[in-house]
Amino acid sequence: MAFDIEMIKKVYAEMPAKVEAARKMLGRPLTLSEKILFSHLHTDQKLEGFERGGSYVDFAPDRVAMQDATAQMALLQFMQAGRPKVAVPSTVHCDHLISAKVEAKQDLQVATTESKEVYDFLASVSNKYGLGFWKPGAGIIHQVVLENYAFPGGMMIGTDSHTVNAGGLGMLAIGVGGADACDVMAGLAWELKWPKLIGIKLTGKLNGWTAPKDVILKVAGILTVKGGTGAIVEYFGEGATSMSCTGKGTICNMGAEIGATTSTFGYDASMSRYLSSTGRADVAALADTVAEHLTADAEVYANPTKYFDQVIEIDLDTLEPHLNGPFTPDLATPISKMKEVAAANGWPTKVEVGLIGSCTNSSYEDISRAVSLAKQVAQKGLTTKAEYMITPGSEQVRYTIERDGFLDVFSQIGAKVFANACGPCIGMWERVGAEKKEKNTIVHSFNRNFAKRADGNPNTYAFVASPEIVTALAIAGDLTFNPLTYTLTNDKGEQVKLDAPSGDELPTKGFAVEDAGYQAPAEDGSKVVVAVDPASKRLQLLDPFAAWEGTDLTSLRLLIKAKGKCTTDHISMAGPWLKFRGHLDNISNNLLIGAVNFFNEKTDNVKSQINGNYDTVPNTQRAYKAAGIGTIVVGDENYGEGSSREHAAMEPRHLGVRVVLTKSFAGIHETNLKKQGMLALTFADKADYDKIQEDDSIDVTGLTSFAPGTPLTLILTHKDGSIDSIKANHTYNQQQIEWFKAGGALNIIRKQVAG
Ligand code: MIC
Ligand code: SF4
């Protein structure tokens, strides 16, 4: 039986009337996204025709999921909220802190020793406050959520940008910072700007070498890393219904890479099959009773341009496999063009390692299709040229693929199987030789490929592809190998072609698992004690941030003007730093160390206006803090792209940065900054970015009359005494302005829950 079935029943019982009321009020058919949004309005939220991309609306999500690297901060905040139990079903998943070094078992043992303090903390907080706890080794949050918790038509939030993965089961699942999760767990409304809607019509059917991954690789190429900002992407068409549920999950998962709020698909037979095979036939049966509300009204898909803000059509019959990268997930190259594109750009073409798995691509179907290629190595007398590694998404998948003999096939091509965890996807890959910083190429089926992300080496060129293409390229050892047309030389000197991959959507013998790794919370957790050692290096209780001083901000110094891409990986690096995710002061030592200083093109090297010397960003900022001098960070386009990690907002806040001023923000990061009481501003005229000089002293004026829709003015006093006055826009609503004034949203929640 499914978890929280009563909650699901309630959602479905209330859905028809809510959808009908919204349809009537708008007087037109509804998209699926609208149906889910309207049926999750918070009880205090008035039903009205919200403006897409304009209105802030209060929602009541059905559940919350958190992974260990973000849960620590989320739960430290929740503990301050003063509630005895979480208000909605919530779970914690231990997946980010496990290194991939030797192999699964050994690596898991190392992690459980090394991170014992953190795991114990998360387990005891879960036990006390009523959260489900998934132990290290149970799997990656998004895979575990898809297997156990996601349900068509539901709405959830999760403290990880790839929470959107659950769109594969027809949910609206949205990645947020820990402060947002804290609100919902504390029983408060969750606010979101009413999204714009992008419709993607999939015609034709996937075939041959093309996989669901190629749909999103193609979409990323079209929309770029910014193109989905503030929008929900809704997929439909015969290409959508003919695809597996887990394939849909892959597509939704990587929707994070185009900045989309989330992505989703209408309920169909593939979802029903997946629910049944993962032990949730009861949910499928319930969904069947409200099936008409779990997809758009027919008129919408018949005439999409009338109902979506943007419509894209992709023909799966002709879609080619793609490779996206290096260094950004939206640089899409069809496989047939890779040879010339790689040559033109000077990309190293020898593939050193192929990695499959991660939260994006580790379904039974993915693995079985990759296995069909691995089998051909022996059958056709080939040898695998590159190293090959697998990170299964969950213990259930791992156990099942072991039972079905897939792991044996992989071991015949020399594969290493790592723990069911994030591992190499998030810099927890102790790759031998990475410290030499050699230029090299890897291909993986993960979702992100920012510089240094997998192994810490800035010269690793990482390309994202489907597990099938990753496997073929690992066998060939060559980035330019096009398995659709090229041949390989076998041990007899013959030219052989790889047959196109094939596999099973779901295990014919069903899924199996011995210990899925779940731990239920205590019925009454009031006696459970959560201890945090004050001397701990890994955990630190939070002190509230100071409230706004009530005046304009004057004489701020420029900490850094970041040039080009500045993702949350650049702002708060992962990998070795993940261990400090529960200790704000310690993790603040990675503040912006990956960002490129506009003035000298170096990373982690900025000028201090206190003594004129160059030093690391954290040292420089700590000196400003000690001297009581506020600072400002300036950024380029899509600043804060990527992860949901609120550390990227809390660290600057903790160290005394007052303002982040950019050409544009990525959605989750902008909200995280607001929540933590920072000023997140954008240049009204993007060209003003050029006016910011290294030795500027900056005043932010207009704060005493800070109001929604009214820009602020920044006065830049340059070193030579000249002055520029520039306008800065913001997207704060009245509530968010209150967060700023209080010094952070949590300061308000604490009062609300207490009072
Ligand atoms: C990621 O893929 O970047 C992460 C690590 O899962 C992050 C969360 C984190 O930084 O802890 C994400 O995607 O939100
Ligand atoms: Fe983990 Fe990578 Fe998925 Fe993030 S994208 S949740 S790091 S596997």
Image: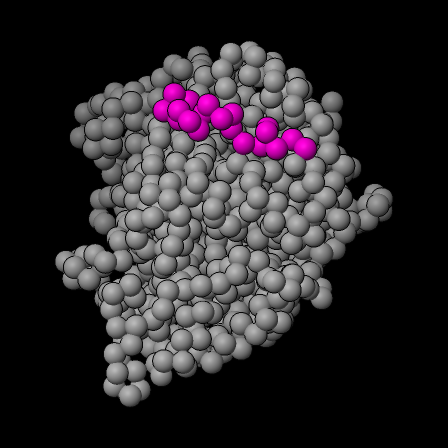
Above or below 359: residue 82: above
Above or below 565: residue 420: below
Q: Can residue 113 be seen in this view?
A: yes
- Residue 587, image x and y in percent? 50, 51
Relative to residue 708, is residue 133 drawn left or right?
Answer: right
Please name the residue shown 52% across and 61% down the image.
504
Q: Does the magenta stretch include residue 533?
A: no
Asked whether 611 or 677 is in front, the reply is 677
Relative to residue 488, is residue 239 drawn left or right?
Answer: right
What scheme was used to colour the molecule?
A: one colour
Above or below 77: residue 431: below
Q: Does the magenta stretch include residue 298?
A: yes
Please name the residue shown 50% across and 76% down the image.
409
Q: Quadrant of residue 704?
A: top left
- Residue 328, image x and y in percent? 32, 50
Q: Is residue 437 visible?
A: no
Please name the residue shown 36% across and 58% down the image.
208
**Segment tinted magenta in the rendering:** 289-308
Say which quadrant the C terminus sits in.
top right
Asked whether 377 or 194 is in front, the reply is 377
Please name the residue shown 33% across and 60% down the image.
462
